[in-house]
Image (cartoon, grey):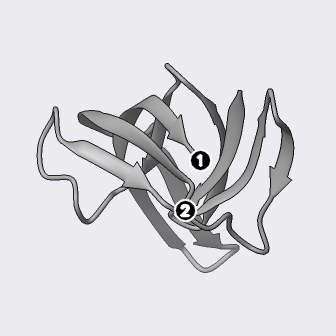
Amino acid sequence: MYAVIETGGKQYRVTKGDVLDVELLPTAAEAGAKVSFDRVLMIFGEGGTRVGNPVIPGARVEGELVAATRGPKVRIFKHKRRKGYRRRAGHRQDYHRVRVDEIVL
């Protein structure tokens, strides 16, 4: 059984036991906290496929916050030719690592 959920403006295909990095969750405070995703777009399982319009009412995905982590460093470099203008910067995105415990219909 798997589900497609939406969080942080992105969609994820999840099954029980999956570990995924999602955008920072406003409700999760520390490692071990329970999280719930109620924007379930699709569920595929033994009973067939259920597709929401846009979400499936009453369906949710339960999980546990494993850790707060950071993504890889992205280097930004801007320049203008023949002008001596160069700027270098970097960015690392913050993520929450979540383990999926259960898909509830």
Residue farthest along the left direction in this orientation: 30
Quadrant of image for the N terminus? top right
The foreground one among 80 and 54 is 54
Rendered location of residue 66, percent (x, y)? 27, 29
Indicate whether 76 appears above or below 31: below
Q: Are marks 1 and 2 in contact (CB under 8 Å)?
A: yes
Q: Amino acid at mark 1?
A: Leu
Residue at x-position 22% and y-position 62%? 27
Residue farthest along the bottom direction in this orientation: 83
Q: Which residue is mark 2?
A: 58
Indicate whether 101 appears above or below 25: above
Helix, strand or loop under label 2:
loop
Q: Quadrant of residue 90?
A: bottom left
Disc 2: CA contacts within 10 A as few (<14), some (14-19) or many (>=20): few
Residue at x-position 49% and y-position 61%? 38
The foreground one among 76 and 29 is 29
Residue at x-position 62% and y-position 52%? 5
Q: Which residue is mark 1?
A: 105
Q: Amino acid at mark 2?
A: Gly
Is residue 72 something one can see in this rendering?
yes
Residue 42 is tagged as none
Residue 9 in the figure: left or right of residue 20: right
Alpha-carbon span between mark 1 and mark 2: 6 Å
